[in-house]
Structures are given as C-alpha cells and as structure tokens.
Amino acid sequence: MPDANHDLADALGHLRHAAHELLAEPDPTGQALALASQILDIENLLEELDIEPAWVPAAETAAGSLATAGRLLGRRPDIVPSEVWPALQAILVEAGDRGHR
C-alpha cells in the first residue's frame, strides 16, 4: 500500500481537478462555482497536513475526481481531519445530483 503522504497528495490532486472541472463548465446558476468553493474549503482543511498536491490524471467528470479523492482519503481515516468527511459527502451528493457521475 502506498504511504500516507502519497495517498493524500493524490487526493489533493483529484480535488484540484474537480474544482477546475466545475469552474470550467458553463454555469449560469452559479451552482458549479458554489461546489468548487466547497472543494477549496476541503483543501483548506487538509492544509494542516502540510502535503503538496500531486499531479494526477483528471477523471472524466468532477464527480469522478471527487470519488477518487474520497477513496484515497478513505485509506487514511486516522490522518484526515474529521471535518473533511461530512463536507466531502455533501459535495459528492451535490455533484452527483448535477449529473456529473
């Protein structure tokens, strides 16, 4: 199993891709911007771990990147701040509701 820093760095890379994907899509409602902002909030929660995001290949959708980030973070639940989990779950639900699965 890869070490914790590698998993967390990859997870941050996927979170960045998800935020970028949401910011790049046309969104007159502003919902994608709100989701991207929530992703940045999760990144801020992870900042205390002092991990740099890794370059990772982008998933096909923002929801795909978020799901991958969630799986990677799930490998290290003892290290991830507890505030990350409800925020990530809420974003996964919202992104899925937008048809980004």
Image (tube, rainbow, N blue to C red):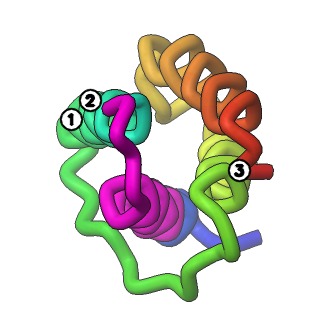
Quick check: 22 above or below 38? Answer: below
Amino acid identity at mark 2: Asp
Residue at 57%, 12% in the rendered image: 86
Instruction: Give the residue at mark 2.
Output: 41
**Quadrant of residue 85 within the rendered picture:** top right
Amino acid identity at mark 1: Asn
Instruction: Give the residue at mark 1.
Output: 44
Residue at 27%, 59% in the rendered image: 51
Q: Does the stretch in magenta take in 84?
A: no
Q: Main secondary structure of the magenta part?
A: helix
Kindly report which numbered mark, 2 or 1, lies closer to the viewer in this rendering: 2
Give percent across and percent down for residue 42. Answer: 35, 32
Residue at 33%, 28% in the rendered image: 34
Instruction: Give the residue at mark 3.
Output: 100
* Alpha carbon separation for disc pair 3 and 1: 23 Å
Q: Secondary structure at mark 2?
A: helix
Q: Secondary structure at mark 3?
A: loop
* Alpha carbon separation for disc pair 2 and 1: 5 Å
Dot 2 and dot 1 residues touching (CB under 8 Å): yes
Q: Which residues are magenta?
A: 10-30
Give the position of the N terminus as an image quadrant.
bottom right
Quick check: 86 above or below 38? Answer: above
Farthest front residue in view: 28
Instruction: Sort mark 1 into few (<14), some (14-19) or many (20+) by Cα contacts within 10 Å.
Output: few
Q: Camera-side residue: 37 or 82?
A: 37
Amino acid identity at mark 3: His
Number of numbered discs present? 3
